[in-house]
Amino acid sequence: MTVDAMRRLPSGDRRPVVLAISLLALGGLALCALRFGLRPTGWGDVWRAFGVFDAGNAEQVVIRAIRLPRLLGAVLAGGALGMAGALMQGMTRNPLADPGLLGVNAGASMGVVLCILLLGVTDPAAFVWVSLGGALIASLLVFLLGGGNKANPARLILAGAAVSALCLALGRAILLVSQQTLDVYRFWVLGGFDGIDLGQIRTLLPFFGAGTIAALAASFWLNALMLGDDAARGLGVRVGAAQALIGLAIVILCGATVAMAGPIAFVGLIVPHLARRVAGADMRWLVLLSASIGALLMVAADLLGRLALFGGNMQAGVMAALVGGPILIWLVRRNGVGAS
Amino acid sequence: MILRLATLSVPVSGRALRSACALGLCAAAVALLALWVGHYPLALAQLFPAIAGDLGDVAQMVVRDHRLPRILCALGVGAGFGMAGAIFQTLLRNPLASPDVIGFNGGASCGALLAIILTGGHVVAGALLGGLASAALVIGLAWRDGLQPYRLILVGIGASLTLSALGDLLMSRMDVLTAADMAKWLIGTLASRDWQDVALIWGGLAVLGPVVLWASFPLARLSMSDDVTTGLGLALTPLRLGLSAIGVGLVALAVSVAGPLPFVAFVSGPIARCITGGGRPAIGAAALVGALVVTLADLAARMVPLVHLPAGVFTALIGAPVLMWLLVVQFRKGRF
């Protein structure tokens, strides 16, 4: 189907097409991510690594033990951040909101810093639980300050920004004072998908699963919430419960991502804006499309960071911003601003 | 209550006036405290003799040439950031908006880094050029039959994220020592400012201040919808363009003296609105809150023993708890 033919369809019909295209592109990129890398491998190696695996073959081991976990990590993180960003911007009705606004990223960073400083932990595997705990505590604090289940978006935003800034500033002060903490922390915060193994992904997979289910369920209510609290109540939605569910989904998705790959700032902010160009105001489609586009952007950024840049590694989050920022500006300029 | 001056009359709410006076007194008290305490011990009564030079050269140097310019810089920088934040938050109708949104900070840090890499110096000039260029770029890219807040925000997000990613990229290509130096500048500090800086910031404020005062009247109407504003007879596009230029000018001024102190521009607006009450954009109160926050942050940076932390670390440590406390208080009173 040509692009022109697609445009003539009513907008409701464009969404499945875009979703399918983005999933296909994700599949293609995933194959590329397995195929290309520092060590030269061929398509045959990729095929054999999953068909007739030979543990003695270095190429196949690289594909299965290094590139596959990395790919899975990027897909999970990108999808989770995309969904969380869409939910966050929908719940607060603010295009500047990113999933870190609930204090998740800052809380996780703070947890890791305190854990290194006070307990002397240096094993990255232990950081998974510490950062999840920090994320939970910080977002609870934000929710309480934001007015509990009577939260109103403006208040929640201010509370989130205040808690995040406080955690980040405390963390930065500790890092400036304690050289040893900085030494361990800076590798965690660079994070990315470098040191991921399949075991870590298996540990966190239940969290991603639960978060995805919660996000998809919440997106049905979000359509009503977007009309304003009173209208939503009139439509029979229990606003407090809906907001709690959305908050829970965001915390689980972001917490698991932070635990896996460190704080990745930009993806959750950009992706929903990209998805909204297609999805319009329907939050169910927005969440789905944000997940697929987020995963696509993340895998592409990770691949680009591995291949293109000076032979060294670049944070996937930074790469995603380098790629996603100009795309966002181009889209805004081309399409003008929708009603969303 | 209505203030009259010749043919000009301005309505002022009593609470806004009272809280502005209280904020001003607080800022003055903190400034005096900052002048008094420090590693060189002085009694409070000795302050003015010390400035006049009656207590010998050392005391005069410490108070007049070290503490006083630093404090005056902090007050001016804070006022600049506070006003800029309040302007952008009202202009874009978004409590999360701050000069970062328009790409200024991202461009400034990129410009500073580029200046260091290419010429080995000229950090401030590079930052100013980078910031102004990126702000102009964002406004230009968002322009389409006028300037619409939502589009400006989206283009600003895209640009500032890309620019700060570019900054990270540049930072990772530098050698460690320069990177560490730059990291300190990028947080923002007020250490060792002299009278030249004071003249720069206060001279700039003296020029921009009256403009801001004049702009605050149409700004208050911008919080209404586009149709209402147009109906009131205001030309939206020139107004938005002019206000953005004023905001960017204020930030450029403050950044050139103290570096991009984080969080001040963001936090001053909400705190000022909580204190003065009502929905009007409290630009004057925001300036006072900003001055107070930066002066306190700099005082804290000076007083923490053993280590030298830049003031930028403390702006959030001081501003964030105040904002949280205000949120709790306001919630109890049933506002929000």
Image (cartoon, rainbow, N blue to C red):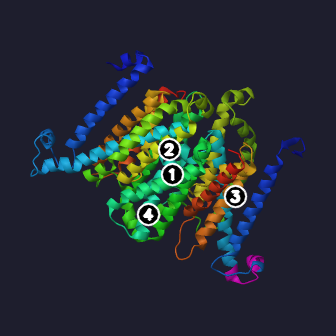
Residue B141 drawn at (x, y percent): 51, 35
Q: Badge 1: how crowded within 10 Å, few (<14), some, or many (20+)?
A: many
Say which of marks 3 and 4 sits in front: 4
**Chain for mark 3?**
B
- In the rendering, which numbered label is found on residue B202? 3
Q: Please, what is the dominant secondary structure of the magenta stretch?
A: helix
Q: Residue B124 got which mark?
A: none
Q: Quadrant of the C terminus of chain B?
A: top right
Separation of residues labelled 1 and 3 (CA atoms): 41 Å
Q: Would residue A197 be counted in the magenta stretch?
A: no
For marks 4 and 2, the one nearer the N-term is 4
- B150 versus A71 height, above or below: above
Residues tagged by mark 2 and mark 3 found on one chain of the structure: no
The residue wearing badge 2 is A247
The amino acid type found where label 2 is placed reads Gly
Spatial CA distance of label 3 from label 4 is 40 Å
Label disc, if present, on residue A113 of the rendered structure = 4
Residue B196 horizontal/vertical position (percent): 64, 64
User: Label 2 to label 1, Cα distance in Å?
Assistant: 9 Å
Give amino acid for label 3: Trp
Q: Which mark is residue A139?
A: 1
Tag 3 secondary structure: helix
Horizontal side of B5 relative to B176 (left or right) equals: right
